[in-house]
Image (cartoon, grey):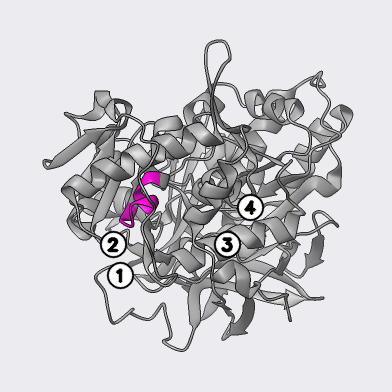
Amino acid sequence: MPPADVPDEVLTTPFTDYLLRNAAEDRPAFTCRTFPGPTDHTLTWPQVLDRVRGVARELRRFTRPGDRVAIVARQDLGYVVAFLGTLYAGRVAVPLSVPTGRTGRARIESAFADATPKVCLTSKDFLDKIPPGTALAVEDIAPDGAEPPAEVVMTDPAYLQYTSGSTRRPAGAVISHRALVAACWQTTECYHAGASTHLAGWVPFFHDMGLVLLIGTPVFLGAHSVFFTPMEFVRDPLRWIRLLAEHPGAITAAPNFAFDLAAEAAGAPVDVDLSHVNSVLNGSEPVRAASIEAFARAFAPSGLPRTSIKPCYGLAEATVFVTSAGDEGPTITAFDRGELVSVGRPYGQRIRIVDKEIWVSGPNVADGYWGRPDRGDTFTGDGWLRTGDLGFVHDGQLYVTGRLKDLIIVDGRNHHPQDIEATVEAAHARVRAGRVAAFAVRDSHGEGVAVVAGCSAPDDDVETAVRRAVSAGHDLPLRALWLVPPGAVPRTSSGKVSRAAARDRWWGENGRHD
């Protein structure tokens, strides 16, 4: 699959050069939308540069080149300035989530222990909620009109992207300045983006998809980014749709579950014009044909072009981007396993399939994991990244079939958890889509499969329907089945169902029986 190469001039131009270029024009750069309202808060490119310079000035007081700087802040303009200011200062950014809930605090503590940041840039009301150390409230940092950018080598680390932890303890992928600009170029190339493009959405900045699409690519293009918080999306999924309608030519991205939520919320046709939407990317978790079709049906009356829906595939270790559908839109193909959604073709990198595993090579690939020089079994040492994902290429397009570590093997037969989860979801109307985890278990009877399913009103009828469907569809008896409230099914920081956490929580506590 021979894709176009990332141009040399891109791979040799520091990311901060684009900030300096953009500041020559007094145009909107980043807009944070807040609710109720909505109310828009906007920084122009000159204002962004001045605030970035202020952050860089303060960081240079407390740190040296190469030191890590944690970012634990609200998803607002302060987060944008903190991330860009860290790169401008020549320090290594560590973008993290806000310290809410036990799981969120544990992730931050784990990342702090791994990255050992010298400084934390945070929101003023989080100063007493982060691990001990030097902390600076971004709101209190005064702008600066003269602070110069750091001189960086393109292979220097720009930031550490902590993985979502769906199958293991989170690790910090080392993203170089070169990898960052390569990923931004890939987005530009694939979706025909330019300075007049709007990058819009709500995906969190600490996640690779939100960071590159809503902060990195706008800087690379000199384009306008408009965003709000993930929580505001959950409160009203149609806020996302209205945002796209307000900004013709918008490019946006979200995990598959968001497509389900938006389609469910649509109900009657939404009175907006979506005919000028550029691309709606579906990635970050397995892309379901049913979700694509439901989303397309829900918003076709509003003019959304079916071709604007772009299934894609990426991972933190590749600075987010690997493959995507192009101008043709979604391709859904019937195979023996059922209908699968293509995640498109590579742009600026190469892929190959080795023993059914997807391998990636290109300038966007991370330089290993922070503090782990052996690179484990993920980075081959000759430029290839072993993704841990299973897949195949058909008619030049990539299809992802599951995770290598999630594969369920019973009596010598391979079962993909996604297939079992789809069967469970279809077994009864009260089982919630995107709220099912299937995983392998072992007891005195050997290998088996267990399921945790989010269910709105569990009873014997639902349990019987689920067990019969799995037995008929996969010739598998369920070793255990838990019907739980939909919100109880654990998810990673990026919104994926965490099979490992579900197995630990339910099988570990209740399932070890003979």
Badge 3 or badge 2: first in the primary sequence: 3
Task: Give amino acid for label 3.
Answer: Ala
Residue density around tag 3, few if under 14, some if 14–19, many if 20 or more, within 10 Å: many
Residue density around tag 1, few if under 14, some if 14–19, many if 20 or more, within 10 Å: few
- Residue range in magenta is 85-93
Quadrant into which the C terminus falls: bottom left
Q: CA distance from mark 2 to mark 1?
A: 6 Å
Question: Left or right: 369 with respect to 340?
Answer: left
Foreground: disc 1 or disc 3: 3
Find out whether residue 189 is within the magenta segment: no
Badge 1 or badge 4: first in the primary sequence: 4
Q: CA distance from mark 1 to mark 3?
A: 48 Å
Q: Which residue is mark 2?
A: 514
Q: Element under label 1?
A: loop
Badge 4 or badge 3: first in the primary sequence: 3
Vertical placement of residue 191 versus 24, above or below = below
Residue density around tag 2, few if under 14, some if 14–19, many if 20 or more, within 10 Å: few
Q: Element under label 3?
A: helix
Q: Position of residue 141 (x, y in %)?
A: 29, 30
The residue that appears at 42% across and 46% down in the rendered structure is 84
Q: Position of residue 328 (x, y in %)?
A: 86, 57
* Discs 2, 1 touching: Cβ within 8 Å: yes
The residue that appears at 50% across and 82% down in the rendered structure is 384
Query: Is there any visible trace of residue 13 in the rendered image?
Result: yes
Foreground: disc 3 or disc 2: 3
Task: Give amino acid for label 2.
Answer: Asp
Q: Position of residue 345 (x, y in %)?
A: 73, 69
Q: Which residue is mark 4?
A: 423
